[in-house]
Image: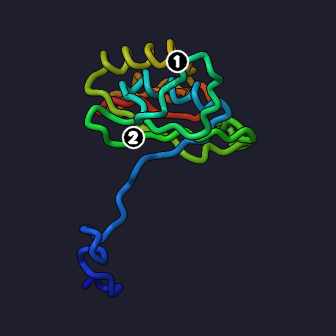
Amino acid sequence: MTDDGIPADGGGAGTAYPVVLHTAIDARDCRGLAEFYRELLGLHYRPGDEPPTDGSPDDADWLVLLDSQGARVLAIQRKLDTRAPTWPSEQVPMQMHLDFTVPSFEALEHHRQRAEGLGARLLHDRSANADEPLYVLADPAGHPFCLLVR
């Protein structure tokens, strides 16, 4: 038993703690943002979430992206009344952001250019910081994310 009376195995579930399933991001254009992160991170769609290929309309409102082992990484949810954050201004708060690490300054530059080519825009350049070079970018829906050397 843990201090709060929960069995150490989480009540038979195999763990005493919840496990992150994925991070969900709201976007007006569900497919567009899913495509951005699919390309940026080398992910693939959960079976059944792929774009239609038969000419039917793409009315996706919840898409899940998986890594190469099939683990969930991100989910994108259509939310038509969402407003893009205005970081660094607090007029519309950031709400959340993602951090992505790369192994070198060369990789940082490469992935910044890739992200911009996929529709990201640069918000802050701290690439000259010797301790932790990074870029803050906004995805196509306006959500800030960081690329940093670690």
Tell me the quarter of the picture where residue 19 sits. Answer: bottom left
**Residue at 26% of width from left, 36% of height from top?**
69
Residue placed most toward the observer, 40 or 60? 60
Which quadrant: the N terminus?
A: bottom left
Q: Are marks 2 and 1 in contact (CB under 8 Å)?
A: no
Tell me the quarter of the picture where residue 12 sits. Answer: bottom left
Report the amino acid beneath label 1.
Thr
The image position of residue 149, as x and y in percent, is 32, 29
Q: Is residue 33 left or right of residue 91?
A: left
The image position of residue 83, as x and y in percent, is 72, 38
Specify few, some or many for label 1: CA neighbours under 10 Å numbering under 14, 14-19, or 20 or more.
Answer: few
**Residue designated by label 2:** 73
**Is residue 30 in view?**
yes
**Residue at 43% of width from left, 21% of height from top?**
39
Q: CA distance from mark 2 to mark 1?
A: 24 Å
**Residue at 61% of width from left, 38% of height from top?**
61
The image position of residue 29, as x and y in percent, is 64, 29
Which quadrant: the C terminus?
A: top left
**Residue at 41% of width from left, 34% of height from top?**
47
Q: Is residue 94 above or below residue 141?
A: below
Q: Is residue 12 left or right of residue 42?
A: left
Label total for image: 2
**Mark 1: which secondary structure?**
loop
Report the amino acid beneath label 2.
Val
**Is residue 142 in view?**
no
Specify few, some or many for label 2: CA neighbours under 10 Å numbering under 14, 14-19, or 20 or more.
Answer: some
The image position of residue 78, as x and y in percent, is 64, 39
Residue placed most toward the observer, 116 or 36? 36
**Mark 2: which secondary structure?**
strand
Q: Which of the labelled discs sits on residue 32, or is there none?
A: none
**Residue designated by label 1:** 53
